[in-house]
Image (cartoon, helix red, strand yellow):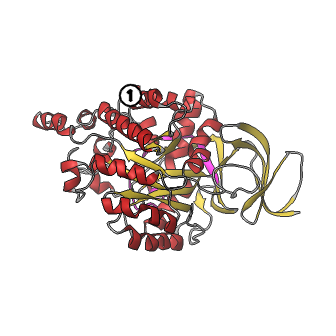
Amino acid sequence: MSYDLVLKNGDIVFPAEGVRRGSIAVKNGRIAAILDPSETVSATRVIDCSDKWILPGLIDPHTHVGFGDKENDWATETRTAAFGGVTGLMSFWRHEDLGASTGPWIEAGEATAMTDFGLHFGVTSRRHVEELGALSRRFGITSIKVYLMYKGATGAAKGFTEVDDALLYSAMQAGAKVPGGVVSVHCENTEVIPIFREPLKDAGRDDLVAWDEQSPGFLETENVFRVAFFGEKTGCPVNIVHMSAAESLEQVRRMRRPGRPPINIETCIHYLSLSRDADIGTIGKVNPPLRPQSDIDALWEGVREGDITTIGSDHVPRKRATKEGSIWTATAGFPGIAQILPVLVEEGYYKRGIPIERLAATTSRNVAALYSLPNKGSIAPGYDADFAVVDPAGTTTVDPAEHPSHSDYSPYAGMTFRGAVTHTVLRGTTVFEDGALACPDAAPGAYIKRL
């Protein structure tokens, strides 16, 4: 048989299983065969992967496409993703009328995206909960997110007036009825935050450490307990997104046990690499806040032990100008989708000795399993031919100007990480190669429907 593409003689990374030297043959966008190094086959194109890792393409489970330049974000942010070996992403979609708005948003993505993509519904009202079953079937979306940070006055300031514990509980009741359903929650007790924030502001504090002190880690942990407890009572799998605090990880460890619904944990690369003491000022403002180094170290142990299920970027593609001003007025969040692999390879593989197959599981197989993404996340015959080819001996220096993103800055700007993506392959099509987009005007990305 002649194949469309062969990735030849690379170190194939099988998520959570191991690494084995071999070649991968691709036909019609799918993995057709895993070959021994000695096997020779014909192909339209052969990419020599000697001394390189072949990983499943990354699937970023946590992005905010549309929060920068909504009309163009699908194009710019998915192309930026390709620079980092990301072949799929999950993005949060919030709208008052999910039924009317979701279809056009998917169509906009399919018209311009360079990577595959799926959606999570952002649930902010009782109407959303009531419509969830029908909307999930209609659009093939099995995951939702509830924003506990939008309770009370904080939510009202953004136009959300129905976010409370009743909405959380009812969303879990509804989510439990969706096949493969999972409810993700932003855990942060914003009702207590003013007790810490006002004295800090009165004292004239305007620094990144103050942003952590106004929302300390235990306010996340308190919400984590409620989410896990409600998940057990409703029979609903839950996912703690962007976990930032060591105490939150310990809380989940205490509550996990056989026979109860899963408590999944997602963290993000900034909680594994940037502390509150980083000299980046308002650029480092994010919710939940950056924490002390002790929290970073504890989360890495959670990755090593498999307690942390997935790792994403929480990518928000706004401009640098929105981060100006004081820590109290700058926008929260920052871009990061192209830095997932560089951070994990440098901080996880090289500095902490975490096996690359463990890291690959958090960015591919586990994401696909959690969100029921068909034919994604693993390297095996029949799966989509999505790959990130990485030179572990190479280096990546972050320069935001090199990326197509709407955002024009990075909290990692100027940093150099060991490991470099040399090729990104989406369903057999090479979309990034040797430092540049291989087909910048193409839009091979497709919507991932899950039901």
Label 1 sits on a secondary structure element that is: helix
Which one is in front, 281 or 376? 376
The quarter of the picture where residue 72 lies is bottom left
Q: Residue at x 41, y 49 (%)?
A: 172
Percent from the top left, x then y, of residue 181?
A: 50, 52
Q: Amino acid at mark 1?
A: Glu
Q: Is residue 3 left or right of residue 320?
A: right
Q: Pick the quarter of the image with the N terminus.
A: bottom right
Q: Is residue 31 above or below residue 105?
A: above
Q: Nearer the viewer, residue 406 or 303?
A: 303
At a point 30% along the width and 44% down the height, the residue shown is 285
Label 1 belongs to which residue?
247
Q: Is residue 409 above or below residue 139?
A: above
Decide if residue 146 is on the left or right side of residue 308. left
Task: Count every numbered label the image shows and give the total.
Answer: 1
Q: Position of residue 416 (x, y in %)?
A: 50, 40
In the displayed structure, 342 sits above or below 304; it is below
Say which residue appears at 89% left-offset and 53% top-offset. Answer: 40
Is residue 417 rendered magenta in the image?
A: yes
For image coordinates 39% across by 46% down, the residue present is: 185
- Residue 318 location (% of width, % of height): 35, 58
Work out whether residue 329 can be spotted: no
Which x, y percent locates residue 33?
81, 54
Residue that protrudes farthest toward the left in the picture: 202
Q: Is residue 264 magenta?
A: no
In which quadrant will I find the C terminus? bottom right
Identify the magenta region.
401-423
